[in-house]
Structures are given as C-alpha cells and as structure tokens.
Image: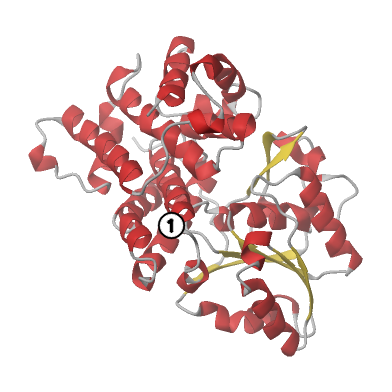
Amino acid sequence: MLAPFTHDPSPSMSYGIDRLAGLHADVVDLVGELASILMITDAGLMATGMPIAMAERLRNAGHTIEIFCDVESDPSAESVDAAAQAARSMDAGLIIGLGGGSPLDVAKLAACVAVADAPASAYATLGRPLPLSPIKKILIPTTSGTGAEMTRTCVYGINQGRKVWAWGPTLKADLSILDPMASQGLPAGLTAATGLDALVHAIEACTHKRATPVVEGMALQAIRLVAGNLERVVMTPGDLNARGTMALGSALAGGAIDACGTGIAHAFGHALGTMAHVHHGRAVSLAMRVAMPWAICEAQDARPGLYVPVAMALGIDPRLCVDDLALAQAGAARFEAMVRAVGLPVSLADDGLGEADAERLVDIAMAAENRPMVEANGVMATDAELMTLARRMLTAV
C-alpha cells in the first residue's frame, strides 16, 4: 500500500535558450520598476564579463544594481554575512544569484540574513529559524549540476571550513531561470564535475528512505536526461540542446533532493570537502562510485532491486541481464564508466589524502551535520562498512 505523503512544490522555474533576454521583465514582475538590486556572483564568472553585461542591461532599464563577487568555491559564513551587509547598505529589494552552487547558496542565505539580527553561522543545522520575509531572489545557474536554484538548502562553511547547512522554505527562489547559454563558458572539468553532481543527486533521491512516487519520477527522469547528455556536453561544449537538457536534468534532480534529501555519498562528499576542499561535484561522485556497488551486493543490508530503476534510467537494457542483481551491477558499472569517460580525477593523492585518513573521513561523515544523510540512505551501513567505503575512496586510482 502506498504510504501517505505531502509534496511541497519547488520554486517557479522558467527555461529557454536566451531566456535571460527577458530578465528586466522578471525583475519588474517581482519588485517593480526602478528596483534596487544586488547581484551575487564569483570572481571566475566576473572574468567572463557576463555579470557586468547583465548588470549594464538592467541599469539601462532603470534599475540600480551593485555586484558582490567575494564568494569562495566552498562559501563561508563570512561571505554570506558580507553579502548580506552589501544588500542592507543599498537597501536591496531584490537579490540575483548568478553562478554555480556557491554564489546561489550565498544569495539564498544572504537574502535571509540581510533582514535579520543574527549572522549566517547562527542558522547552521537548524540552529535557529530563518526569517519569514527575506529579500526576494532570482537564481540563475551557470552550471548544470548543483540544483541549488531549486532547493531550500544552503551549504556553507564555519569554523575554518567545516561544511554545514541551513534549511527552510524561505531559502527557496522566487524565480529560477534556466538558460543553456549561461553555461557555455564553463570549462570541461567543471562541466563534468557539476554534471555528475546532478546525477548523484538523482540517484540518491530515488533510492532515499523518504522517496515518494513524485520524487522517483523527477529523479529517474533527471538520470535519463543527465546520463544521455553529459559526455556530449563535455566533448561538444557548443551543443545548446544538450546543455539545455542537462540544465533541466539538474533542476529536476534539485527538486527531487529538495523533497527528500541526499544520502551517504553526500555525507562522505561533504567530509572530503571539509578535509581537503575537494570540489563538491567530484567529492560526491567519488563517494557514489564506491557506495553504489556496495549497496547493490556487498552491504549487510544489500538491496539490488532498489537500483534496478536507476540502472534502466542510466541506459542499461534489462534484456541483456540475467536477473536484477546483474542489472543493478551493470548500472553501477555504467556510472563508473561515465566518471572515467569525462575525465574526473579518481585518485585523492594529489589532494593530500590517503588510506591513513580513513578514520577521520568516517568521523566527519558521521558528524552531526552529516549523520542524517547517512541514516536516510536507502541502504544502511555498519561501522565496519563505513570504514571499508572510506578506504576505497582514499585508495582509488
């Protein structure tokens, strides 16, 4: 019997090639003419000229706009606080987040902190409720992977890089805009890492303890869209149709994890980020490439059937597999092949990590901010299994 559930819809989302040409009308719809706008982005995107060109178009339309670009790859609470202060100083009525997951997360939380009397660190792991009336926000992803434009979660660092999260409905965008042209300048390595991040989101969502038919529908479609286009986008960066499909897949995956959460690969991924600032997309992909085979056939609580729909969405033909176990294993092999095909570095040696770090990796993965993800995973891990997975991640070549 289907268990009862409630699905709280994701934020408004609009898609189209050159969709950003209509940004002025979106601003007017949300906050009116002559708006005061803070755009939050990062230095890498500033170097492309995109934020400056967008800001100039909005100024020419009569809006006042300033740009905040002091956002790290793994954003800190200090970045959020500085962005919030910039918004207060100009009395911003709208925040536009432009970039990958880091600028979008900073934009989401800064929109709340700017109207509050507490710093960003106060909201870590539900430390206090978020303000109910944040500054309105438009989120524009320039990668197809984090899904941050669709979620009510913000991941950021406190206490010298410890990765934590804030959560609440007021972190959701008022409008998310998906434009394939916005990601055209993304380097191949970041295209690969962020695309795999979306794939991990989708796999974890549809195998999650709290997955519902709605989550499964979004997640499995996301797997199909991402798996069918990631290698093409990496190899042929000018293919806007493939980029558009990736953007939609990433958004669907974001909507799926927004509804249920993530699992063990994200717990280990966040731990790798805390330990060595491993890029998030790469970190969760390295965790998934060992977690998926383990969950299928090695875990004490192994559930190959849970991964059959995943394997089929990844493109595995069930007619070529003798049973569900073989089908699920073929799906895990397909994920591994994709990681290798897009050139994602698997070894963590150059990041300064090795087998000797396994115990610390497990300790951080099981810290208060990460433990809920481990416990919500569709397949439960024993203490010994967590150590096995950690060692496999740290010794991969």
Residue found at the far top of this picture: 384
Q: Is residue 130 left or right of residue 49?
A: right
x, y percent for residue 242: 35, 66
Q: Position of residue 281 (x, y in %)?
A: 50, 44
Name above or below for residue 38 compared with residue 227: below
Residue drawn 61% across the image and 37% down it: 277
Q: Is residue 18 above or below residue 195?
A: below
Where residue 3 appears, x then y in whole percent? Answer: 41, 36
Which image quadrant: the N terminus?
A: top left
For the point 33% across and 57% down, the residue is 225
Instruction: State the residue at coordinates (79%, 58%).
Output: 133
Secondary structure category for the residue under label 1: helix
Count of labels shown? Answer: 1
Most foreground residue, 353 or 68: 353
- Based on the displayed image, in which of its 4 quarters is residue 49 positioned? bottom right
| Other residues around mark 1 within 10 Å, as few (<14) / some (14–19) / many (≥20) | some
Q: Inspect this view and state whether residue 231 appears.
A: yes
Q: Residue at x 63, y 60 (%)?
A: 44
Q: Report if residue 381 is visible in the image.
A: no
Amino acid tagged 1: Ala
Provide the residue designation for mark 1: 188
Pick the quarter of the image with the C terminus: top left
Instruction: Say which quarter of the image contains residue 234.
Output: bottom left
Is residue 356 shown above or below 32? above
